[in-house]
Amino acid sequence: MKRKLIILLSLCFIALAQAQVEKMEPPFWWSAMHHDELQVLCYGKDIAKYNVESKDITIRDITKTENPNYLFITLDTKEVKAGTVSIDFKENGSVVFSQQYQFKSRRENSAERKGFDSSDVMYLIMPDRFANGNPENDSHKDTVEKADRSNPGGRHGGDIQGVIDHLDYLKDLGVTALWSTPLLEDNESTYSYHTYAQSDLYTIDPRYGTNEDYKRLASEMHKQDMKLVMDYVTNHWGSKHWMIKDLPTKDWIHQWPEGFRRSNYRMTTQFDDNASQIDSKGCMNGWFDTTMPDMNQSNPLLLKYITQNAIWWVEYADLDGFRVDTYSYNDKDGIAKWTKAIMDEYPNFNIVGEVWMHNQAQIAYWQKNSKIGAIDNYNSHLPSVMDFTLHDAITILFNEDENSWDKGMIRVYNNFTNDFLYPDINNILLFAGNHDTNRINEIYQGDIDTYKMAMTLIFTTRGIPQIYYGDEIGMLGNRDKKGDGDIRRDFPGGWQGDTKNAFLSSEIKNGRTNDQEAFYSFTSKVLKWRQQAAVIHTGKLLQFIPFDNVYVYFRYNEEKSVMVVINNSLKDQQLDITRFKEGIKNYSVGTDIITDSNIGITEDFNIPAKTSMILDLK
């Protein structure tokens, strides 16, 4: 009898253990959200065999898929209060087990949070390469790839603590927003520092820190009036994601008969009226890489999952914006719904999408309320896009000294003549380089005069400037010849034992070199001025056709005007002031922000070769 009882109890224990929910996502939620419906994913062995009920909250719907290990429970959260509700899993009318689910109180005014905008300057880091604040988490037992700083494509140990430790550096530089490449867990065996092949969307990679560390980063930044922007990946996950290993539905990802098919990368097929179906499918449904399964945003369960996940991170970590990777590779209707849902929850939030195209009309198609998109009856609801065409021009024009109609500074002028295509021109992201491009200082061989011209343009024209970490100290890197690792070098001084520390002034022993200081001091000086220059944030742009490779433009409003002059010529040039009277108006003197010198603008004046001026008019 005793033996039978032991066997019976053992069987009951095994059955109970198998019945438990292994994962419940989102892990918790908040009361008083704009969206009053919550989809809770429950994962566990054969969990779909149970009926689900609750006395504490209304269940609107229960969805089962072909995989019996999943249940999708839709809860009505309209009247839910902060606290815990119980969800019962029943079989044959009896409760087999219950699962507790928590609702938390939101931060005060959470819905009204203000995202980044044209008053900000965004600083882009790859956290693994920025600073190692906690050497103890360089490798972790739960992740495969271990730290190897000698490997340009390996993990080097930078982490969230390293960023927190150097917020004073960012503050002194004059940046106001931080965009970090993804920090969520990436458990690929190689190249995991890149973190775009994510294996868990609710967990910070332990080699960067913890979820609490990420929340603390946002908190510490907010104390210094800086904003945190999360790099969010909707188009693909990593091959080691737990759901990829046990798909909820066959169409959770895009699958091909041969197993893997790479995207054709032709984003134009998204709006090309003449595109063949096979090419359109090849772009949207093709995988970005072998380790990055392409997600199917037209699957409503997946779309709800990634929408809630994004909102969860905003609410949990107190974020100020998203940068969305490979935005234009997604199912365009699905990504529009994703974007709208987030903006409905946070009307003053901001999201910038990576639309890596080389034509303004094609990029503008993806911005919210685009007249071009309207032709196709399409609205992405995406507030901001990245100005890749300006980037294209910047990487070429400063090596051109020709009086040609399509070279040199005329490239910039031509770029801005197409601004009418964008529905919100001040809400586009400007950059001279990022983690996927050759470094701007490599392209121009570390020439500080060229850097000053390029960044004068980025810092003073319309839009939101973005700096790639290390550009402000003259860092080099050639992706074409040496690979990705070369443009993602470690920031000097971010690791114990570094012989030089570029986080410190050149006046401090082992601090920045004189050359690094020259780059840094220029950048910091202009950015600190820009913080207070409202006319640069929202003023209108008045530009003049470049002659002799000299480009002149004004940023102005009713109270203020700034005159910017960029001489890309190899010769000193004299400006004919009468030509610029429309911008100069009644101003007589301009203080050059770069040199602190006063320049009379009532008569012609010279500007040296390869020089830029930012004249604050008085």
Image: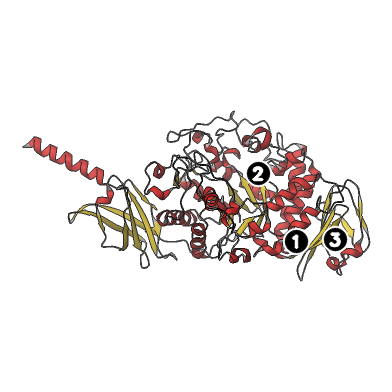
Q: Which residue is mark 3?
A: 590
Q: Is residue 112 left or right of residue 554?
A: left
Point out the tag, 2 or 3, that comes first from the N-terminus.
2
Name the element at disc 3. Answer: strand
Q: What secondary structure is marked by label 1? A: helix
- On residue 286, the disc is none
Q: Nearer the viewer, mark 3 or mark 1?
A: 1
The residue identified by callout 2 is 469
Q: Nearer the viewer, mark 1 or mark 2?
A: 1
- In the image, 10: left or right of 272? left
Q: Is any part of residue 424 visible from this angle?
A: yes
- Residue at figure coordinates x 54%, y 52% from the top left: 280
The crowding category of the residue bearing disc 2, from other C-alpha atoms within 10 Å (few below 14, some 14 to 19, many at least 20), is many
Amino acid type, callout 3: Gly
Residue depicted at x 53% and y 55%: 319
- How far apart are the alpha carbons under marks 1 and 2? 30 Å
Q: Position of residue 471 (x, y in %)?
A: 70, 43
> Callout 3: few (<14), some (14-19), or many (20+) C-alpha neighbours within 10 Å?
many
